[in-house]
Image: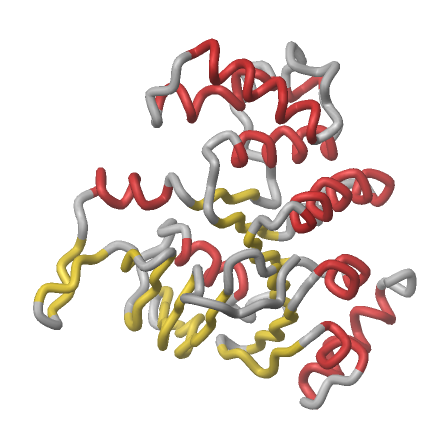
Amino acid sequence: MSSQRTGEPLVHAVNVHKSFHGNEVLKGIDLDVWPGEVVVLLGPSGSGKTTFLRCINQLETIDGGRIWVDGDLLGYEDRHGTLHRLTDKKIADQRRDIGMCFQRFNLFPHKTALENITEGPVQVKGQNKDQARARALDLLERVGLKDKPAAYPSQLSGGQQQRVAIARALAMDPKLMLFDEPTSALDPELVGEVLAVMRELAQSGMTMIVVTHEMGFARDVADRVVFMDGGVIVEQGSPDEVIRNPQHARTRSFLQRVLTEHPAA
């Protein structure tokens, strides 16, 4: 984790808008995320958190504004103030630097844990198969699954599948990791094992944007908490500022509801 703000932000989002079928889901999001920072996005369903992550990873095309990652304007080339859409290949090249873990693990069901992890480095980055395999085994050990390289997703618990998904994303050596409610599909007793891997990632200096309702993780691991509602950022600050002492009525209402539904948080 890092709260030092030196140089340029790794993620620089300016006035980001996105609509679906006439419904404006993002209404002008401005957000900077600094190298090594862990930012947790909180907010009710429909607040735009997941859409914003998907825009950063170019799974959705923004309707207005701009997003830069590590100085690269995502999805477009700026020619004298006019934006021109990049080719699919160039967009795919940009996406390689951004890892993403979803609520559902999106593993290839017909491939083993090891094969799921090596697929991207070999097929997308052209990495040597032996190198990719060695790196995949190291990553499986890192996420606590050293003994599962030959297991298929159907043979793994939800928590184990999510840890394979994290290892798969890390195999691409991303500059940024995005997590979209990575524990929401898990049985409660499996949540801790995934959060432990994410805590270790944060401690190693990985830049992370995490959508979650896990208040303990947000309080202990986040450098900054951003509360979104209705497609806008309502407030942001340190976990102490936003979770323990929220300034906005909408934030207080949301946190009271979460703590009522999940007293352990």
Residue 35 relative to residue 141: left or right? left
Viewer-proximal residue, 88 or 223? 223
The image shows residue 169, relative to residue 58, as above or below, that is: above
Among all residues in the image, which is located at the extreme right? 264
Q: Residue at x 75, y 27 (%)?
A: 144
Among all residues in the image, which is located at the extreme left? 80
Residue 113 falls in image quadrant: top right
Viewer-proximal residue, 89 or 45? 89
Residue 110, horizontal then vertical, whole percent: 53, 15
Residue 236, horizontal then vertical, whole percent: 61, 78
Numbered disc total: 0
Residue 240, horizontal then vertical, whole percent: 77, 77
Q: Residue at x 67, y 58 (%)?
A: 212
The image shows residue 171, relative to residue 229, as above or below, that is: above
Residue 153, horizontal then vertical, whole percent: 64, 21
Question: Where, quadrant-wise, is the C terminus in this rendering?
Answer: bottom right
